[in-house]
Each structure stands twice: as structure tokens, then as C-alpha cells.
Image (cartoon, rainbow, N blue to C red):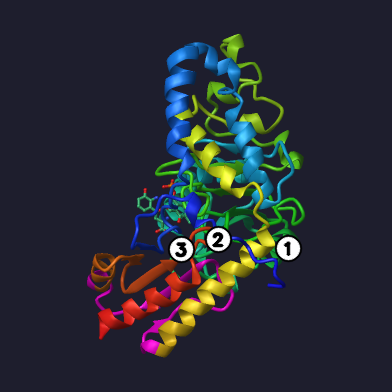
Amino acid sequence: MDGEELRVRRELFDIPEGVIYLDGNSLGAPPKHVAERVQEVVKHQWGTRLIRSWSEGWWEAPQRIGDRIGRLVGAAPGQVVVGDSTSVNVFKALMGAVKGTGRTEIVVDESTFPTDGYIAQSVASLTGLKIRPARPSSLDLTEDTAVVLLNHVDYRTGELLDMAEHTERAHAVGAQVVWDLCHSAGVLPIELDALNVDYAIGCTYKFLNGGPGSPAFIYVPHAKQATFENPLSGWNGHREPFGMQPSYEPDPGIVRARVGTPDILSMLALDAALDVWDDVDLAELRQRGLQLTALFREHVQKLTDLEVVTPEQRGNQISVRCPDAKNVMDELVNRGVIGDHRPPDVLRFGFAPLYVTDEDAVKAAEVLADVIR
Ligand SMILES: Cc1ncc(COP(=O)(O)O)c(C=O)c1O
Ligand SMILES: Nc1c(O)cccc1C(=O)C[C@H](N)C(=O)O
């Protein structure tokens, strides 16, 4: 990489000695300084400043941290807000997208992570639209399509969809698109603004290392904010939350995507975790992710006859079809190689370039070969 290689920052993370951690696509490893920062929030902000902390940075934290994530997903400030779970944000985005439409269908990637499909189903029952599951390679969008919900990187296979192409196809028939960035935020450069994406949502506990259950994010671009109707009209989205008025008037900007009181401890843990991203060049990160996944794939193919199901267009994940995947993964974990498995027969290995090394990739393939032998 022309001597400009991304620095592996493993020393910044708490990962036990002897563990090869390849599950950062499910729960990212903790940056070391997060524990101390959370303690400071509890002891000093909560413990000393008490209620005053709300006006000393807590209240605006969802927007401020949203802007930090915005840098990682190609969104200019004022368009991303952090809060709630990914599932709740899928609901807000889909309801926002279908509000007032005369169109009849919501198209959902048929292999989507289940929660997205379940939430889309709820949106369909509430609005009277129909769900049409479809393969990303043949979405067949028409003038009946109100919105298409797509996973940028497939959670099971690691396949990466072409965001530019799919967004353009949706727009060509006048449909909107909601992107789920759970498995691509912190993996590659994303250009939400440049591609005119309608809505995007994602979690922060995978490659962004925000911690278990850390708050999710939603992107509502400036152009949509005036008309975006949050289906969950909580007081945090009100234009004057402390006015305590009986009727709901949304904030004019991204704040309208907020709902209720943010979970400050998780949110500020995420804020601290994002420090490790401050000087990361996403193009370099992407190159490292591709190198690591290629190295692991090459060794799996050399040392075993297992089928790699991850296509060339991929995120930071290699998935391998393996009979008895659960027992194989249990044994890998016993031997210090932590990945996971998804039904029916897929072993998943995630490669977070900030803390996974080339040696980890090679060793993991060797241990896998040994386990299945
Ligand atoms: C693509 C995708 N969407 C959504 C979720 C989860 O949603 P939530 O954060 O609400 O549990 C996950 C993983 O848990 C996921 O992989
Ligand atoms: N969100 C998770 C959880 O609360 C517990 C265990 C795992 C998860 C995950 O994130 C799973 C993950 N989205 C997946 O790709 O399967």
C-alpha cells in the first residue's frame, strides 16, 4: 500500500492475550480508554454535576455524536442522529419513506437480517402497503414501489451491494431507498450525500466498537428533513422540548428523528470509542479489510476443501459453509479463535482492520483446518 499502510491499533484495544478475535462484525472489541471515560461520566458528570450535566453536553450528545458518525458514512453535519436501536430506526425510516405515498409495495432484500424484515412487516400492516421480498440482483422495482430496504453488506454471506447502482435504480422509478449500514459502517468509505441516499440506519456496536447495545443511528438528509415525519413523536424530537406544550411540533432539522431520553452512559461510551476513528483514512481501512479477508480466504482454500460463500464484492467478512457449523465454531472458540455461526451451516469470520493482524488471519485458517481434519 505504498508505505501508507493503515496502522494496526491493536494496542488501543482490550483483547485477551492468545485470543484471535474475528467477531467484530457482531460485537466490536472495546477500545481501552472507554472504561475510564465511562467511569468519569458516572463519577464526575453524573456524580458531581448531577442534573446540570444535561445542559453541559448531554442533551446535544445525539447530534454531536451523529456528526462524528456522519464523517464515516459520507454525511455532512446535521443529518445523522444517534439513539434507539437499529430496529427502531428501521421503523422510523420506513414509515418516513412511505408516508403519504400513493404506491403499494415495500421491497425488502429477501435475505435481510430478520429484524429488518419483521419491522417492514409491521410498517406494511400499519400502512396497508404490501411487502415484496426480492433478491438484490433482481429487485424488479416499478412505479408501485414506494421504498426498497437493502442491507449494504449481507450479514450471512458478507456480500457487498453496489450502493450507487441500487440507489440510482430505485430513483429511476421514483422509489426511495433505505440502506442498513450495520455491516458496512466502519468497513469502507460510504457516500450517503453524494449518492442522494434517501435514508440510512445502522448500529454502532459492530465495527464502530460502541459497546453491547450501544445506540444506533439514522441518516435523514437535509433535503428530506422538512417533510420527514417521525412515527414516534417523542418529546426529544419536539422543536421546543422544554416548552412542555400539549401538541407535538417537530424540530425543523435532524433533531426530529429523536424520540425519548437518550441512554447517556451507552452514548458517551460510544463517543469515547469513536476516538480511535479520528485519524483513520477510510480508503486505507478498506484496502486493509480486503487484504485481510483475501489472506484468510486464500489460506482456507489452500488448507481445507470448505466452500467460501462470500463473493468477491464483500465487506470485512468471510463466510464458509461447513457441516456441523455450531460444533466446529465451539471448538474454534475453545482454541482461542472467536468467530460465530449462522444457521443452517455458515461459519462467519469478521476482520476488523484496527485490531486484526495478518498473523491472526493465517493462524485462524490453520486452526480451522486442524479442527475439521
Ligand atoms: C443488518 C442488521 N440489521 C439490524 C441488526 C440488529 O438490530 P438491533 O440493533 O435493533 O438489534 C443487526 C444485528 O443485530 C444486523 O446485522
Ligand atoms: N445485536 C446482537 C445481539 O444483541 C446479540 C448477539 C448478536 C447480535 C448481533 O449483532 C448479530 C449480528 N447482527 C449478526 O449479523 O448476526
Check whether the beta carbons of the residues at disc 1 and disc 3 lie within 8 A of each other. Answer: no
Mark 2 and mark 1 lie on one chain; the one further toward the N terminus is 2
Residue 143 seen: no
Separation (CA) of disc 1 from disc 3: 23 Å
Identify the amino acid type marked 3: Tyr
Name the residue beneath numbered marker 2.
Answer: 8
| Element type at mark 1 | helix
Front-lying residue, 311 or 244: 311
What residue do we see at 75% from left, 39% from top?
222
Name the secondary structure under disc 3. loop
Q: Which amino acid does label 1 sit on?
A: Glu
How many numbered tags mark residues here? Answer: 3
Q: What segment is highlighted magenta in the picture?
A: 303-327
Quadrant (top left/top right/bottom left/bottom right) for the N terminus: bottom right
Position of 180 with respect to 162 (left or right) is left
Q: How crowded is mark 1: few (under 14 residues within 10 Å), some or many (20 or more)?
A: some
Contact? badges 2 and 1 (CB < 8 Å)? no
Q: Which of marks 2 and 3 is in front?
A: 2
Q: Where does label 3 land, which residue?
A: 155
Cα gap from disc 2 to disc 3, whole angstroms: 24 Å
Give the foreground label among 2 and 1: 2
Q: For numbered disc 2, what is the local secondary structure?
A: loop
Tell me which amino acid carries mark 2.
Val
